[in-house]
Image: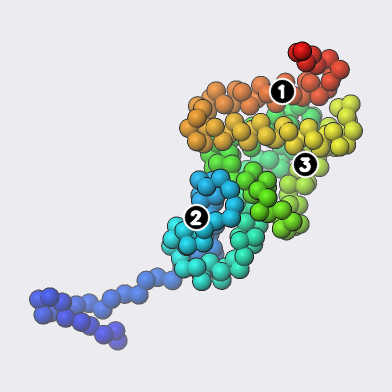
Amino acid sequence: MGSRTKNNSGNLAEPATKPKRLAPEVRRAQILDAAARMIVEQGYLPLPLEQLARHAGASKALIYTYFPTQYELFNALLDRELRSLALGGLDTASRVEDLDQAAVLCAMLYFEHVARNGPLLNILMTDMYMSGHFDSHVLETRDVIVGRLKALAAKVLPLSDQEISAAIEMMSAIPDECGRLVFHGELDQTTARQICHGLIVSSLKALKAPDKVVIPD
């Protein structure tokens, strides 16, 4: 039976209840959510661990229990982000057998994701802190989707494999940047969506006939 203490009036107070222990998967998700918000706000890696612990409502020791290194934390975030995109329609869109339709669908789905959640994926993928520290299995989802788009492009575009890879990488920056502007309130969503769609369509046309692209002097 729990001990009871006297309150200011001299009466016995009810025993204090212990804080409810969170399930491991809930605590892990809280840490990931806090890290995601901080990365998008900060714009780069790594994170100050003291601030992460405070935002997650956990101790530094507890964070180390779940993620012994920040590389493991960021790989877990990257895995969650890629799976979310795939389940949100990106995997299905990449299976469309028409390049124009597949590219536009993938771009617009990614745009909506970034506009809603911020440019987390881009930061995780491009920050030099993660160079050489990606878990190969985490990138499998991305590689499968990009592989499908490359295969479609190879059938249609008069470009080498290396040029196709570069083109896909450059085109992925369009929805990322448009979505980022919406997320940070620098552009309204309707205008950004139209710009994103227009740039993807124009890029595809230029890639199909690069010899017809006129570059001003």
Q: Nearer the viewer, residue 125 or 31?
A: 125
Report, in whole angstroms, how far the alpha carbon at label 2 lies from the one at label 1: 36 Å
Q: Could you tell me residue 66's position as x and y percent?
A: 57, 68
Q: Amino acid at mark 2?
A: Ala
Which mark is drawn over residue 201?
A: 1
Q: Nearer the viewer, residue 96 or 181?
A: 181
Q: Which secondary structure, mark 2?
A: helix
Q: Nearer the viewer, residue 3 or 69?
A: 69
- Image quarter (top left, top right, bottom left or bottom right) of the C terminus: top right
Quadrant position of residue 214: top right
Please state if 71 lies on the left or on the right of 117 as rendered: right
Which mark is drawn over residue 61?
A: none
Quadrant position of residue 174: top right
Q: Could you tell me residue 158's position as x and y percent?
A: 89, 26
Report, in whole angstroms, how far the alpha carbon at label 3 lies from the one at label 1: 18 Å
Estimate how packed mark 2 is, as few (under 14), some (14 to 19) or many (20 or more) residues with alpha carbons within 10 Å.
some
